[in-house]
Amino acid sequence: MTVYELSQNSQFNVLTLPEPEREINGAYVGDLLSWVMGRAQADNVWITIMSNINVIAVASLSDVSCVLLAEDVTLDNDVLATAKEKGINILSTSLAIFEAAVKISGMI
């Protein structure tokens, strides 16, 4: 499954999609950035409620396919602009973190 295909689900909203054809091979849920850097795998969907500029840096270092912001979390426009510049796909959802993880698990 690609990030674009995931984004077509009505429960996920596109915030940035500079690399829509990135493949997804799993998911990682976490908000402690140092743990995400050490445990998220390349091409995972990273599900989080973190909303600062450090999310973009961690997503880049971890080489995740996309970041999924759960529970209606939003990003400031400057953070979104940085995500686009760095080629980081960002999706959002109103689903709780657990529900988002279950939804993705059933799709991939």
Image: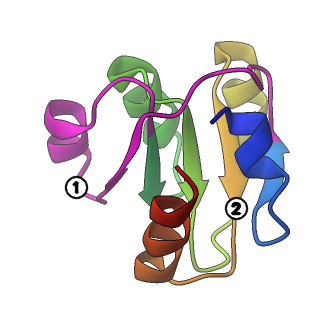
Please rate how many residues cluster around mark 1, counting C-alpha atoms within 10 Å: few if below 14, some from 14 to 19, many from 20.
few
Q: Are marks 1 and 2 in contact (CB under 8 Å)?
A: no
> Relative to residue 106, is residue 74 drawn left or right?
right
Q: Amino acid at mark 2?
A: Ser
Give the residue number, with chain letter if any, for mark 1.
Answer: 32
Mark 1 → mark 2, Cα distance in angstroms: 19 Å
Earlier along the polypeptide chain: callout 1 or callout 2? 1
Work out whether residue 50 can be spotted. Answer: no
- From the image, state whether disc 1 or disc 2 is nearer to you: 2
Choose between 96 and 32: the one closer to the eye: 96
Residue lying at 51% horizontally and 84% vertically, measured from the top left:
96
Report the label total: 2
Which structural element holds mark 1?
Answer: loop
Please rate how many residues cluster around mark 2, counting C-alpha atoms within 10 Å: few if below 14, some from 14 to 19, many from 20.
many
Identify the disc placed on residue 92: 2
Segment colored magenta: 16-44
At which x and y percent is residue 24? 52, 34
> Relative to residue 56, is residue 17 drawn left or right?
right
Residue lying at 68% horizontally and 17% vertically, measured from the top left:
87
At which x and y percent is residue 47? 45, 57
Work out whether residue 29 can be spotted. Answer: yes
